[in-house]
Amino acid sequence: MAQVNQPLHTPKNDMPQDGWIDRFAPASVRPYLKLARLDRPIGTWLLLLPCWWATAMAANGAPDILMMVWFAIGAIIMRGAGCVVNDLADRNFDGRVERTATRPLPSGQVNVWQAMVFLGVLLLIGLLVLVQFRIEAIIVGICSLPLVITYPFMKRITYWPQAVLGLTFNWGALVGWAAVTGDVAPAAIVMYVAGFFWTLGYDTIYAHQDKEDDRKIGLKSLALRLGDATPQWVMGFYCVTTALLAISGGLAGMHWVYFPLLAVACLHLVWQVRTVQIDNAANCLKRFKSNRDFGLLVLAAIVIAGLAR
């Protein structure tokens, strides 16, 4: 086990030591809150935003605020559950990467059984949130569980694990639409595919932080597959994202104002690609996190166009 926990190199780790968890949470629960990444909300945003997009676009006018709140709670819980599954699967690999070596599982702050019990609690809370929606949304939501479970293992077998993440993280677009209308319309499916390509882009940027360690320990990612061609590929992914979001809005009968506002959001993606430095981990992390802003710009476009209908 000593070899497993020996870092391969020494970039900055990703477990903040002076955040709100360390300042305010009781010592006994800190490892679990960190295991669920509650001090690193970007993943929750990226999971939540497709839910909000669909909820807003499917609405007749303003979106249902209570429904948006339930989706926010559900995103926090299910993102936490996904992180536990991911860390259980990767606990031996994480111990060999300095950025992840201090996470609760590889560092020994939480053992496997404790993590599994915690996962069970999160899934139970997630189910309690899911049943607040109509039956069609519940069924659609449950169908995402195989993706949640299998994603962490994809980096062992394919250079396209980001594709499975895209299928998983954007499932909320289908759930959100079903929660509002009781069905999954073509506009929702197109939005889901748009989110898939969005994830291919932002998570490939994210993966460049770990590419050297991944190469040494035998894990795969699009960062390794695409290499120096990453910016061109990401631009392509983002162009498809924007085109499909436009098509989704057209299928949903959105007011014309949606389309110029979407174009403004697209400029943010252009900025990401034009300024990304794939060999600079801090730069990649900043561009990755900035996708929250893109998602909020798209949400604003949808809400404004919905109110203008």
Image (cartoon, grey):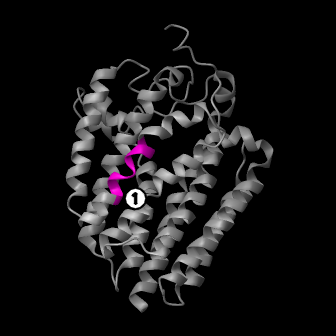
Looking at the picture, how far across and down is residue 19, in whole percent? 37, 39
Looking at the picture, how far across and down is residue 213, in whole percent? 65, 26
Does residue 233 appear in the picture of this structure? yes
- Residue in view at x 35 percent, y 80 percent: 59
| Residue stretch in magenta | 140-148
Amino acid marked by disc 1: Leu
Res 238 quadrant in image: bottom right
Which residue bears the numbered disc 1?
48
Taking the magenta stretch, the answer to whether it contains residue 154 is no
Res 72 quadrant in image: bottom left
Q: Is residue 274 left or right of residue 262?
A: right
Which of 279 and 81 lies nearest the eye of the viewer?
Answer: 81
Q: Is residue 255 left or right of residue 114?
A: right
- Residue in view at x 63 percent, y 33 percent: 210
106 in relation to 160, above or below: above
Does residue 281 appear in the picture of this structure? no
Taking the magenta stretch, the answer to whether it contains residue 145 is yes
Looking at the picture, how far across and down is residue 200, in whole percent? 61, 53
Which of 120 and 260 lies nearest the eye of the viewer?
Answer: 120
